[in-house]
Amino acid sequence: MEARVVTSFREISPADDDKMVIVLAIDRHDGLVDLLRSFYQAGVLTLLITDRDINLPPDVCDSRTTVSADKFVETVKDLVTPIFNNGMINLDFNDQSITLRNTSKFVVCTADARGGDSRIADAVASFPGKIPDRKHVERMLWSITHNRKLNPPLAIKEIAPITEFIKSLPETIDIVWGVLIDDSLPGDTVRLSIIVAGKEL
């Protein structure tokens, strides 16, 4: 994975081996549309993160989200971390692509769960208010991440709140999920992340 910081959007163009580009933009700068379109038309998964709603043509990126500028780094990390962590059920770039390609809009939600039997339920309970319009969710990528020495261990029955949450979404939704290991997490923490995408979000 490579990250580049540029002072002008004209300084960067797609390479033959590029699979995904995440563009961070504050306001609509000169060259933004051309930059996005160059990657999008090259078949690169093209994602845009802005700090405000920017009026753009429909054919310039696969999907976009709006977050405050101080959340840019966190949002990028939440997007890419699941596809670089291994675990019991791995996620990869293809899962990311299936979830986000040609979806127009996406939202990333992450919650750290601690404690006993209710930890996953508590994390899931924080998600509904972060998703603008659940009836328009088309695709979703779930990742459940924890330290390999998680204590207490994750129990199957703890997953029930996730199932109930999914039942509140459209029946036609496409869901990808993984269970991942990240030993940088505290030993009592389960990190629950979802990437939600849809054309009308």
Image: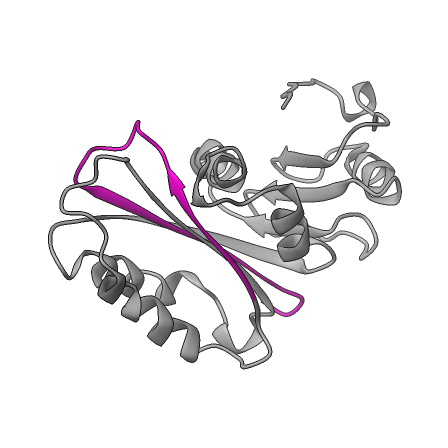
Whole-percent x, y for residue 79 in the image: 53, 41
- The stretch in magenta equals 175-201
Query: How many numbered marks appear?
Result: 0
Q: Is residue 6 above or below residue 68?
A: above
At horizontal 74% and vertical 58% (from top left) the residue drawn is 102
* Residue at x 84% of width, y 54% of height: 59
Task: Give yes or no for residue 37 being in the magenta stretch.
Answer: no
Picture quarter containing residue 15?
top right
Q: In this rendering, would 115 be left or right of 45?
A: left
Q: Position of residue 53 (x, y in %)?
A: 61, 52
Report x, y in % for residue 76: 52, 36
- Residue at the limit of the structure toward the left, as seen here: 116
Specify the quadrant that holds the N terminus: top right
Q: Image height check: is 122 above or below 172?
A: above
What x and y, as percent, mark residue 47? 67, 44
Is residue 118 depicted above or below 85 in this figure?
A: below
Q: Residue at x 40, y 60 (%)?
A: 130
Is residue 123 or residue 88 the one in the foreground? 88
- Secondary structure character of the magenta stretch overall: strand
